[in-house]
Amino acid sequence: MRIRSWKARSKRALVAAALTTTVVAGTAGWTVGTEQQPLTGPPPGTASWRADHSLGVRLPDPATASPTRVASFFDALSAARRHELVTRHPSVVGNLDGAPVALRYEANARSLKAERARERRRSTDAELTAQDRERARALSVRYDELLAPGRQILAFDPRGRGQVAEVYGDLDKARHVAVVVPGSDIDLSTFDRAKDEYGTPAGMGRSLYAAADGRTAVVAWVGYTTPVGLGPDAATGRLAEAGAPRLARFTQGLTATGAPRPAVFCHSYGSVVCGLAAPRLAAADLVVLGSPGMRADSVADLHTDARVWAAKDDSDWIGKVPNVELFGLGHGQDPTSPDFGARRVPAERAEGHTGYFTPGTDSLRAFARIAGGAGPAARTIGART
């Protein structure tokens, strides 16, 4: 009996895997040559930070010190000593989970200015190719945009395709916090692109902040290497496995500095990251939207005490992708299925794969209530307000 059951499950999984390949081939096809190397490890400049003994104490190791340890270290420093570290090590302080929020803003502004000056020099360097000079010009413009007055950059790493996190609202005083985790094709250059605004983390973050009450701060977080296109990276968990510890540490860093446990909103492939991070995620709520799966069969398999929510609109193409995980391909059960056990978020007015945060949608209205700490007794949250 067990052998027949195992064979039946294997047959269903093989059929679903074949269907997954067919759907991908029938939409955009596997994107060739887009395998990404995930950015892992501590922030740039860590070697110099570790070698710095000017304060007479050992600085917390960015690779091993917990965010709580980092927060305690900075709490014991005078304002003058904090700023010494910002001046000498902006790229570390700006990305150090557990460091004071205002200090990270200052550090990242310094790093952005330094990178902008570097790219401006490269844009006129005759020894570089025309293509490299053009890329340098584009990057200098990108850094100009991120340095615009009023922007609050909580993380910035120029390595690879670039990573960034931006805050909307007052993170230090907020009664509630939300974190937006994006899916494929998002990096430093596409973080806040004008095209498909509500498919970008910045567009999602701004829209959620505007819809929520004034006591909720929102963080748009691009702290992992995302897949590019519908290639093997998007169909496997390799990049999510590299990104999950970074997301967990980031949320731990928020709570270490006194912020409340956030509601984490995970779009598309970002929900794979969130699923793998769930056991270590310092989150009050975990919300997935347009999800291909969380690499779990049920809420219980996530091993989290966060409330888990799921949204998927009928026009989202992700619904055509079979939910299977076989030999590393696919991401498992649909989080909106009754068997998964998540609380359902209405999404009848959302359109397509990137319409969940569009102003006026029932999904955005529900997200705002969740971000604002909707009561624990809520099972459905679709009532109009």
Image (cartoon, rainbow, N blue to C red):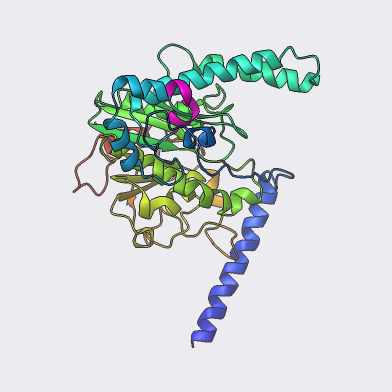
Instruction: Identify the residue at horizontal 57%, vertical 79% (top origin).
Output: 7
Q: Name the quarter where the C terminus is drawn.
A: top left
The x and y percentages for residue 290 are: 47, 44
Foreground residue among 298 and 122: 122
Observer able to see residue 366: no
Instruction: Identify the residue at horizontal 53%, vertical 79% (top origin).
Output: 6
The x and y percentages for residue 336 are: 40, 52
Toward which corner of the image does residue 254 lie, by quadrant? top left
- Residue 220 in the figure: left or right of residue 306: right
Residue 88: say if magenta. Answer: yes
Instruction: Identify the residue at horizontal 51%, vertical 39% (top origin).
Output: 353
- Residue 350 in the figure: left or right of residue 326: left
- Residue 297 in the figure: left or right of residue 100: right
Q: Main secondary structure of the magenta part?
A: helix
Instruction: Identify the residue at horizontal 51%, vertical 26% (top origin).
Output: 197
The x and y percentages for residue 383 are: 25, 38
Foreground residue among 136 and 44: 44
Labels in figure, total: 0
Observer able to see residue 8: yes
Toward which corner of the image does residue 247 lie, by quadrant? top left
Residue 94: say if magenta. Answer: yes
- Magenta residues, start to end: 86-95
Toward which corner of the image does residue 57 lie, by quadrant? top left
Foreground residue among 39 and 300: 39
- Residue 356 in the figure: left or right of residue 11: left
The x and y percentages for residue 243 are: 50, 46
Vertical comparison of 208 with 115: above or below = below
Foreground residue among 269 and 75: 75
